[in-house]
Image: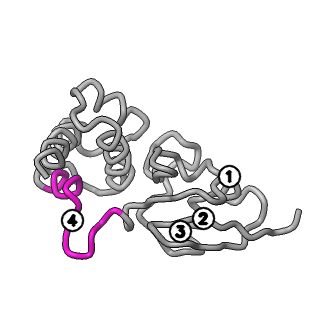
Amino acid sequence: MASRIVAFKLNGREVEVMVKPLTTLQTVLREQLHYTAAKTGCRQGGCGSCTVLVDGEPVMSCLLPVENIAGQEVLTLEGLTPHDGLHPIQQAFVDHFAVQCGYCTSGMIMVAKALLDHNPTPTRPEIVDALSGNFCRCTGYQPIIDAVEEAGRRLQAG
């Protein structure tokens, strides 16, 4: 099959990419557009390290053919991070020592962003449920859950 051009919005700006059929969003982000926050983990949708938001919903970019997002909006960690520091979710992760090796962090933060956008005051079980598709080998999850709770409070406080 022939390559085609796919247009979508990435971190607030319009982009067009030439792709072969079934090229994943993760491949396009990392190899064509040089956005590397979405990590390459299992490539099977089982670890969550490649999570980005598509129209505000968390998706595993390693499984998603980029043709499926034509005309949609993609947000990566690079687009979440303000130019003058850290987003409140990122700062909460730092403050609660929820970042160790860092491999899962961008995916965790993007899931937390989607959760807090939909539910600004989630319960701990709701946080655990939201993060259930993201795998971390280092933190034991408690610091991550604490960080998401704190980020919710910070975002509510403005």
Picture layout, residue 133 above or below residue 24: above
> Of marks 1 and 4, which one's residue comes earlier in the chain?
1
Q: Residues within 10 Å of mark 3 (few under 14, many from 20)?
A: some
> Going 27% across and 45% down the picture, which residue do you hit?
138
Examine the image and state in which quarter residue 26 appears. Answer: bottom right
**In this view, 14 is above or below 39:** below
Instruction: Measure how far apart labels 4 and 2 are at the Cα level.
Output: 25 Å
Please tell me which of labels 1 and 3 falls first in the chain: 3
- Under tag 4, what secondary structure? loop
Please report whichever mark, 3 or 4, sits nearer to the chain's N-terminal start.
3
**Residue identifier under label 4:** 86
Magenta span contains residue 93? yes
Label 3 and label 4: CA atoms lie apart by 22 Å
Mark 2 or mark 3, earlier in chain: 2
For the point 60% across and 67% down, the residue is: 28
Camera-near label (3 vs 4) is 4
The label on residue 30 is: 3
Structural distance between the alpha carbons of marks 1 and 2: 10 Å
Indicate the position of residue 24 as horizontal and vertical percent values: 64, 57
Q: Position of residue 39 (x, y in %)?
A: 45, 59
User: Is residue 96 rendered to the left or right of residue 123?
Assistant: left
Q: Are marks 2 and 3 in contact (CB under 8 Å)?
A: no
Q: Nearer the viewer, residue 154 or 147?
A: 154
Identified by mark 2, the residue type is Phe
Specify start and end residues of the magenta stretch as a single range.
Answer: 80-94
Which circle, 1 or 3, is nearer the viewer?
1
Element under disc 3? helix
Residue 8: image tag: 2
* Residue 78 position in % (x across, y down): 38, 67
